[in-house]
């Protein structure tokens, strides 16, 4: 049996997107579920067994089966709700130096807030206020741990004192693996609508841009001989 709590932060500085209310919810003290914003998965039973049987003096059969779980996925910061807005702001700002002389200097001094056109902000000025946030993170509350089932069967036969033939089959199957998707993916433009309609206007959840979702929807299968 394998149990691992979902990640939570020492001072509860975490947030998650709530699709039911289309809003950002923040962690609170209390249960692990309230602190992690993801429910613990307590169903991770992991039986394993194997066998070896000497069929004849020169032949051996071997096999095994096991269940394991994935408790961490290498998704950079996408799977860590402690890097979500408003704790962390992800912004892309293109700076510009299209003006010269005193006019450019005036623009540098005015570079703040939401004003970024023909603007250049020096490092010494620090981060401007009201940075736009480009990405929101979302993990479903009922996200289970990824599960992998593995099995193998082999036959080993001694031909001579120096030669052994080994035939083996190996397989595995995994489910509930993490995959990344845009939960707020914009639909394609329609033939009869305004061709100037922006990408943001075609998103299903208005008021938000990209919502980077970590979904337990991926799977894998492998068979080898």
Image (tube, grey):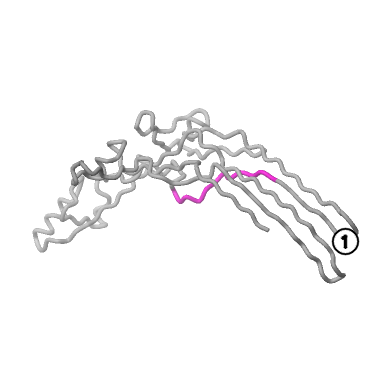
Does residue 86 show up magenta in the picture? no
Residue 36 located left or right of residue 199: right
Q: Nearer the viewer, residue 117 or 29?
A: 117
User: Can you give x and y, in whole percent of width and height, for residue 137 in the image?
Assistant: 40, 41
Residue 78 located left or right of residue 102: right
26 up-or-down from 61: above or below = above
Q: Nearer the viewer, residue 69 or 76?
A: 69
Residue located 62% across and 34% down the image: 43
187 up-or-down from 18: above or below = below
List the single residue furthest toward the bottom.
Answer: 162
Residue placed under numbered mark 1 in the picture: 58
Residue 29 located left or right of residue 201: right
Would residue 87 be visible to someone looking at this image? Answer: no
Label 1 neighbourhood size at 10 Å, few (<14), some (14-19), many (20+)?
few
58 up-or-down from 128: above or below = below
Q: Nearer the viewer, residue 141 or 103?
A: 141
Residue located 71% across and 52% down the image: 152
Residue located 31% across and 36% down the image: 205
Residue located 60% across and 33% down the image: 42
Would residue 64 be visible to someone looking at this image? Answer: yes
Question: Based on the displayed image, in which of its 4 quarters is residue 133 positioned?
Answer: top left
Specify the quadrant that holds the C terminus: bottom right
User: Can you give x and y, in whole percent of width and height, for residue 213 in the image?
Assistant: 42, 42
Residue 83 located left or right of residue 134: right
Specify the quadrant that holds the N terminus: top right
Does residue 67 show up magenta in the picture? yes
Q: Which residues are magenta?
A: 66-77
List the single residue furthest toward the front.
Answer: 191
User: Can you give x and y, in whole percent of width and height, for residue 107 in the image?
Assistant: 13, 54
């Amino acid at each position: 049996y394998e149990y691992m709590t979902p990640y939570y932060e020492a001072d509860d500085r975490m947030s998650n997107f709530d699709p039911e209310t289309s809003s950002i919810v923040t962690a609170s003290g209390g249960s692990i579920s309230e602190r992690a914003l993801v429910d613990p998965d307590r169903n991770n039973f992991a039986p394993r067994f194997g066998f070896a049987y000497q069929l004849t003096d020169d032949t051996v059969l071997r096999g095994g089966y096991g269940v394991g779980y994935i408790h961490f996925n290498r998704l950079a910061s996408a799977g860590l709700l402690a890097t979500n807005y408003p704790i962390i702001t992800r912004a892309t700002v293109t700076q510009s130096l299209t003006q010269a002389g005193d006019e450019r200097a005036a623009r540098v001094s005015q570079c703040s807030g939401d004003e970024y056109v023909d603007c250049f902000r020096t490092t010494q000025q620090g981060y401007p206020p009201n940075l736009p946030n480009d990405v929101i993170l979302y993990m479903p509350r009922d996200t289970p741990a990824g599960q992998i089932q593995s099995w193998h069967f082999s036959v080993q036969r001694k031909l001579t004192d120096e030669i052994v033939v080994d035939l083996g089959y190996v397989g595995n199957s995994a489910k509930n693996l993490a995959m990344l998707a845009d939960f707020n993916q914009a639909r394609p433009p329609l033939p009869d609508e305004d061709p100037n309609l922006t990408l943001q206007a075609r998103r299903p959840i208005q008021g938000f841009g990209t919502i980077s979702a970590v979904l337990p929807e991926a799977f894998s299968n492998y068979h080898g001989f």
